[in-house]
Image: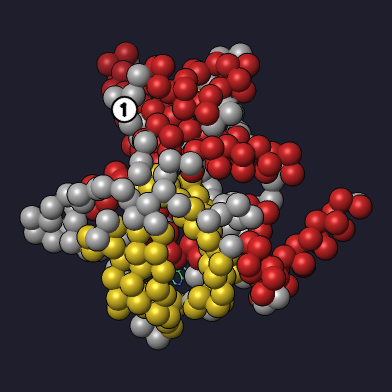
Amino acid sequence: MLQLFIPLGFLGIVYRQIKYALADMDLIFKLLDRKPEIQDRPEAPSLALREGGIRFEHVDFHYQPERQILHDLDFSIEPGQTLAVVGHSGAGKSTLSRLLFRFYDVSAGRILIDGQDVREVSQESLRAAIGIVPQDTVLFNDSIYYNLVYGRPDASRAEIERAAEMAHIRTFIESLPDGWDTVVGERGLKLSGGEKQRVAIARAILKQPRILVFDEATSSLDSRTEQAIQQTLSEVAENHTTLIIAHRLSTVVDADRILVMEQGRIREQGTHRVLLEGGGLYASMWELQQREGADTDER
Ligand code: ATP
């Protein structure tokens, strides 16, 4: 009997591990929103990263041929600068970050990083250059320590602690009964939206990418958390070329430049002040959000 129990128990463990692994793979693909058919060209060289300048050159894009999503997008982000993209839901904002990562290829035009077409370089080197703070951060069912370090397994304990500190999450982690060993994720401690974003920011800091993409969560955080995240973000963005996909205009006020998108086209661009003075789409979106904010505060 004993002999029968052991293999069954063993199989149970293997089954659980496979199930967990698959669940995580599923989450990863969901996170990346990735189509697997994008392949490297044979012998594709690594991206020769210098200052991290980005250029979208007359980019058209569709997910399905019958529905064009982006129309002739043409803009640059100078090295070290922050560009924020705003626009109504469905305008095509998050699609920009997917194209930059080359989860999809453009239908026309080019995307260049430091002058190199993203289709010409290895995907591995491309993604190593870019840190992303996604809308929804996927946590592995593992310790919070592992969740931070998995993007850069060679990081030292001191580096991890520093990244957590910069992301303003270290004190929180160390206040948990199990500290860094606390298991998080679906089967562990559930982190709030703001805490998850901070984990993602810490991961991005640890990765030390030249380029940072922040895809702001659509679901709103309470205003204190939101302010803290914004503060962290602007500290982290200081030495990086940064693309912010923004859902709340309060996030973009300090950006070097703002693109206002509408139905896959650039409708306006400029600084917050210039766009407000322009009295166009951005100014009306700003006014609406101010009013909504005031309504919420009154409640
Ligand atoms: P939101 O502010 O709601 O996040 P967004 O401006 O980021 O919106 P995108 O996610 O870039 O918008 O989507 C732009 C358009 O592309 C939308 O109409 C959307 O329905 C469509 N779209 C997005 N992902 C896919 C996909 N995988 N397949 C087909 N269509 C898609």
Q: Is residue 229 left or right of residue 77?
A: right
- Between 294 and 185, the one nearer to me in the picture: 294
Q: Name the element at disc 1.
A: loop
Asked if one can make out residue 188 in the rendered structure from this viewpoint, the answer is no
Across and down, in percent, residue 120 comes to: 18, 61
Among the 4 quarters of the image, the one containing residue 65: bottom left
Q: Quadrant of the N terminus?
A: top left
Across and down, in percent, residue 103 comes to: 33, 60
Q: Where 194 falls versus 116 (above or below)?
A: above
- Between 34 and 109, the one nearer to me in the picture: 109
**Mark 1 highlights which residue?**
153
Residue depicted at x 77% and y 67%: 287
Residue depicted at x 58% and y 28%: 168
Residue depicted at x 35% and y 77%: 58
Q: Where 51 falls versus 4 (above or below)?
A: below
Across and down, in percent, residue 176 comes to: 61, 18
| Residue positioned most to the left | 43
| Residue positioned most to the bottom | 66
Across and down, in percent, residue 91 comes to: 54, 72
